[in-house]
Amino acid sequence: MTRPVRVAIVGAGPAGIYAADALLKSDAAADPGVSIDLFERMPAPFGLIRYGVAPDHPRIKGIVQALHQVLDKPQLRLFGNVDYPNDLGLDELRSFYDAVIFSTGAAADRALDIPGHDLDGSYGAADFVSWYDGHPDVPRTWPLEAEKVAVLGVGNVALDVARILAKTADELLPTEIPANVYDGLKANKALEVHVFGRRGPAQAKFSPMELRELDHSPNIEVIVNPEDIDYDEGSIETRRGNKQANMVASTLENWAIRDVGDRPHKLFLHFFESPVEILGEDGRVTGLRTERTELDGTGNVRGTGTFHDWDVQSVYRAVGYYSSELPKLPFDVASGTVPHEAGRVIEGGEPMASVYVTGWIKRGPVGLIGHTKGDANETVACLLEDHAAGRLPAPEHPAPEAVEAFLAERGIRYTTREGWYRLDAHERALGAEQERERVKVVEREAMLDASEATG
């Protein structure tokens, strides 16, 4: 083959860009070369970094600098505001590219099937995250009338949700939040936020730094019940073998023995409380019922038969993300992933020719952002192995301009790498007017307009 290997990557979040980086660093990049097109349904790249990370985490958003270095490579093009499969389907992608990598992530909420989950005032954490991160496809307002709020889950997303609910709007104003989010948080009535986990401190999935950041706000009093500090043999083994778990448990222990201060907003971290029902009246949330659990010796828990009703007016379910099914690809409903072997998509027990997955659609929504690098390396290695073995069918229209002509013929208004930089500059200019680093543009049409602006 004298032309470069043409690869389409669907999803321009960290997983997709890490896959592009792996391709660009491979031997194939030198001979015969690689040509990569990133397709992203949003007008801007970076996926989870832009629309899934809390705005008061600039340290994590710093990953964008490394992603930009990949995005700037001349062998790579960005096609934003292009939706799979509505704008470009699998058959079309195969006609333009030697291989297709899907890195579409997980943006929906995993279901929590308990009575009352569908009451008014019961929310999925992913929806709330999309709102406060300025996602263009969600409503511009959010109901924040509850004075007492429950958050179900003990992962970093639960902490993000609890922290945003407990902070004041003015604390968050220096971040990139748009005006509609600031106005919404300004009207927030929450004075108590209760976070619930069904297991103990040693089993919490918080990262140590995220947990400690809760205590940095001058407005948030973090409270842990001393009765919730308990370990069995399995928990002790977890602490011995997992440095992060030990650091989390130590932080929680210190908070449990200190005196409660007078900061205005109270954030309670509850352990050994398993949600069994969201209580309601007239279709609205009026409380949460939990069952007290106890350790069984292995680090797991069992119910005690003791129940408690908590006075809360809204509940946020932060029990995990779930990927959306991709048309024309197989899908495992239980795990929310595409069946694969080392990144090769498997259908009917056999690999689908030229189709691959990486990131959360491949392994599920677990681990930190950096963990997707290993996924990408594994998937790209399989793709290049298949290419070397002649297992990738040659595309009918491999010329780079063919896909541009296709999108133009369909009237798809897409953004480019240069367009993203125009949008980026526009958002930074909006921020500079308010002595902030950036103010995020929310409306899709406004994002497209800024991407296309000249002069």
Image: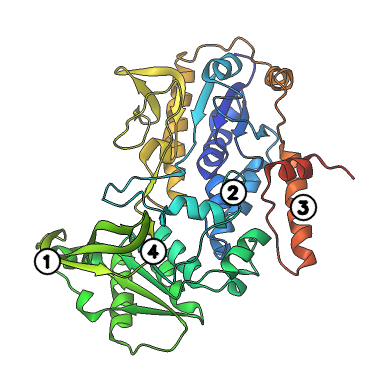
Q: Residue at x 49, y 19 (%)?
A: 387
Judged from this view, the residue extending furthest toward the front is 282
- Residue 136 position in % (x across, y down): 62, 46
Give the CA separation, mark 3 to mark 1: 54 Å
Work out whether mark 1 precedes mark 2 in sequence or the reverse, and give the earlier one. Answer: 2
- Mark 4 surroundings: few (<14), some (14-19) or many (≥20) residues within 10 A: some
Q: Nearer the viewer, residue 198 or 214?
A: 198
Work out whether mark 3 precedes mark 4 in sequence or the reverse, and give the earlier one. Answer: 4
For this view, does 256 lie left or right of residue 237?
A: right
Secondary structure beneath dot 1 equals helix
Q: Are marks 1 and 4 in contact (CB under 8 Å)?
A: no
Mark 3 sits on what residue?
Answer: 425
Q: Residue at x 78, y 42 (%)?
A: 449
Mark 4 sits on what residue?
Answer: 207
Q: Are marks 3 and 1 in contact (CB under 8 Å)?
A: no
- Residue 66 position in % (x across, y down): 60, 51
Disc 4 residue type (three-letter): Ser
Give the CA separation, mark 2 to mark 3: 19 Å
When asked about the image quadrant of residue 226, the answer is bottom left
Mark 2 sits on what residue?
Answer: 135
- Mark 3 surroundings: few (<14), some (14-19) or many (≥20) residues within 10 A: some
Relative to 397, is 174 above or below? below
Secondary structure beneath dot 2 equals loop
Work out whether mark 2 precedes mark 4 in sequence or the reverse, and give the earlier one. Answer: 2
When asked about the image quadrant of residue 418, the answer is top right
Disc 1 residue type (three-letter): Glu
